[in-house]
Image: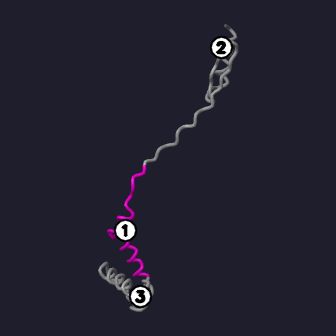
Amino acid sequence: MRKIWGERDARACVKAAKAAGLSLGAWARRHGVDGRSLHAWSVNLARTSPSAVAITKPTLIELVPPPAMRAARYVVRIGDVAIEVDDDFTDETLARVVRVLRAC
């Protein structure tokens, strides 16, 4: 079994296999060519062919973060006074606000 000698040889063998309507392996066996060598060359040729480049040409996709979830809002009403807080409001801060309001 002979190995493929280079790009020109590989292109000729791949073309001949396609023209014969055979798989690369079947064509290689019939013509005394190392099938693994021919397959490796065909993979490399497919990666560098102009049509392969056109197919795999990258496309710009804009990645946008999802909108932030709105924090829950809480309203505490005592008479005419209302305190509005969200989930980020700490217990300590709420206790200070209540102490100030009691002093009024």
Q: Residue at x 36, y 74 (%)?
A: 45
Q: Which residue is mark 2?
A: 81
Point out the tag, 1 or 2, that comes first from the N-terminus: 1
- Between the residue at mark 1 and the residue at mark 3, the CA separation in whole angstroms equals 23 Å
Residue contact between numbered discs 3 and 2, judged by CB atoms under 8 Å: no
The image shows residue 62, relative to residue 1, as above or below, that is above
Whole-percent x and y of residue 91? 67, 24
Q: Which residue is mark 1?
A: 52
- Between the residue at mark 1 and the residue at mark 2, the CA separation in whole angstroms equals 70 Å
The residues colored magenta run: 36-61
Q: Main secondary structure of the magenta part?
A: helix
Point out the tag, 3 or 2, that comes first from the N-terminus: 3
Left or right of 95? Residue 68 is left
For discs 3 and 2, the disc positioned in front in the rendered view: 2
Quadrant of the image for the N terminus?
bottom left
**Residue type beneath disc 3:** Trp
Left or right of 65? Residue 15 is left
- Between the residue at mark 3 and the residue at mark 2, the CA separation in whole angstroms equals 89 Å
Q: Residue at x 60, y 32 (%)?
A: 71
